Amino acid sequence: MLRVLRWSVLVAGAGVWAGVLVGAQAMDTIYTYVRLSPTQYQHVIHDIFGRDIVVPANAVEPGVRDRGLLALGGRKLALSGAELERYNLVAWQIAAQVVDPARRATLIGCTPAAADAPDEACAAGFLGRVGPLLLRRPLTDDELRRYVDTARAATEALDDFYAGLEAALGRMLVAADFLFRTESSTPDPAAPERLRLDAYSRAARLSFLLWDSSPDAELLAAAGSRALMTEAGLREQVDRLLASPRLERGVRAFFSDMYEFDKFETLLIDSETFPEFIPSVEADAREQTLRTIADHLLNRNGDYRDLLVTRDTFLTPALAALYAVPLARSQELGGAVPWTPYRFPDGTPYMGVLSHVSFLSLHGHPGASSPTLRGKALREKFLCQTIPPPPADVDFSAIEDSSTHRTVRERLDAHRTNRACASCHRMMDPIGLAFEGFDAASRHRTTENGAPIDTSGELNGQTFTTASELAVILRNEPAVTSCVVDRAFSYGTQRMPTKEERGWLTALATDLRGSGVTWRALMRRLALEPDFHTIPAADVRAER
């Protein structure tokens, strides 16, 4: 009975906002909504209440990918009934953990006069402290009053102060301004075609780009004092955020999106054909690349382009077996998989993130490699080029026939006789074939069906004979820098750049190619650019 009463209070709280998730305009202020991603939701809860709070894995659906990024699909302005029900259930689960007796002394910050009666001062103290952190802005007096009233009503119904506090917190956890980044903006007098974010929206955009989480108290204070709206105040906060250990979370979130690591959830590799590809390899593969990226960009302050050619990485015993490299098995502590820094020797085929399992196995078939899928992924994720979908009536008989043509190169050559396929395959296959030295499980090989594998090819007039040589060519390809700059801007603003913005983004990419594409330099330039803190007016009109 107690759980049913608590549940009914939370559902009532959801009804406050469920019907109003649309772009709105009040006088000169315009509101747009960007839904939190699964990792953002988790990071916000952990930052405010502690990492021991369990956030269900399915708390938030990953969303839809738009033009290569999940972030661009985040401007979802409606929720299904099933999503609302899930949000309510997760809110109740989190609120129950926060008010649990084991955490009360740490998280609540006060003790009620009586455990079975309302204590509005204690409730207001707790809700008034966590509310701005959850909603990313100050609570109005009326809002705080309503949350305190929810706590009082539930306490009176359940004769339990903490059950009342749980109900009020649960209601806050299903508020629109928690589940969505509510971006508030006003027309820019100097440029009517764009809208300027207010200080709190600016703070949120910064923190979600750099930390993949909500603003902390100091950043909210800078917004409240309007220091964040000044050049000096903005610079101070950007530098502080870039110096924080939380920056690694932002790096991981960005590259997980850019490299489409959400597809690991549906990755299928034939374990009978590839017995080394044990279940733990999928999680290890994603972590290997993210750990390598974070170490290279943050710990070493390395150039992004060098991720294509670095031989430094991290391995687990399972990955070492797949790569067929010697790795001493260190003792596992507390059941955790040990990660060991490792450098692939010069001359070996493994070099750069394009030789990681995360790239090779994610872009293939369950039982076979795919030069076409690998070439497509390279074009789209590292060069930001668009490959159109194949025609609906494609004849795949040539590519599937290994009796006549023993290697994939031979079968693709035969397949390209189909004129409808030839133009796209000319973009994908020559560079994808460079990776035919690796099978679907990322194991190195030199033959296929007894025939030698030819990994040579050409990119933009430059020839290569191996995947490593192609990686060196790509490292110096200007589009690699332009791509990561454009993707970072779109990820942070959750929109595509305008024609005018593409001009300075191109100039930024040119500067970085000369000075080095280091992560903190890129993030700092983006975060300090006035255009980063705007919304094109045309985007708002399109959402309505």
Image: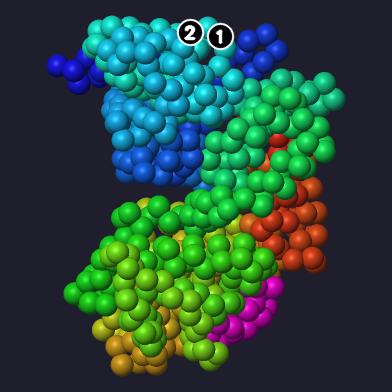
> Where 120 falls versus 538 (above or below)?
above
Report the front residue among 115 and 59.
115
Where is residue 489 drawn, in percent x and y?
Answer: 65, 46
What amino acid type should be assigned to the residue bearing mark 2? Arg
What amino acid type should be assigned to the residue bearing mark 1? Asp
> Where 15 falls versus 319 (above or below)?
above
- Furthest toward the front, the residue is 113
Give the residue pinned by disc 2.
145
> Is residue 486 shown to the viewer in this render?
no
> Where 447 falls versus 256 (above or below)?
below
Where is residue 135 drawn, in percent x and y?
Answer: 52, 25
Q: Residue at point 23% right, 77% down?
A: 275
Give the residue pinned by disc 1.
141
Q: Are marks 2 and 1 in contact (CB under 8 Å)?
A: yes
- Mark 2–mark 1 Cα distance, whole angstroms, equals 6 Å
Q: Quadrant of residue 382?
A: bottom right
* Magenta span includes 234: no
Where is residue 409 drawn, in percent x and y?
Answer: 42, 81
Q: Quadrant of residue 215?
A: top right
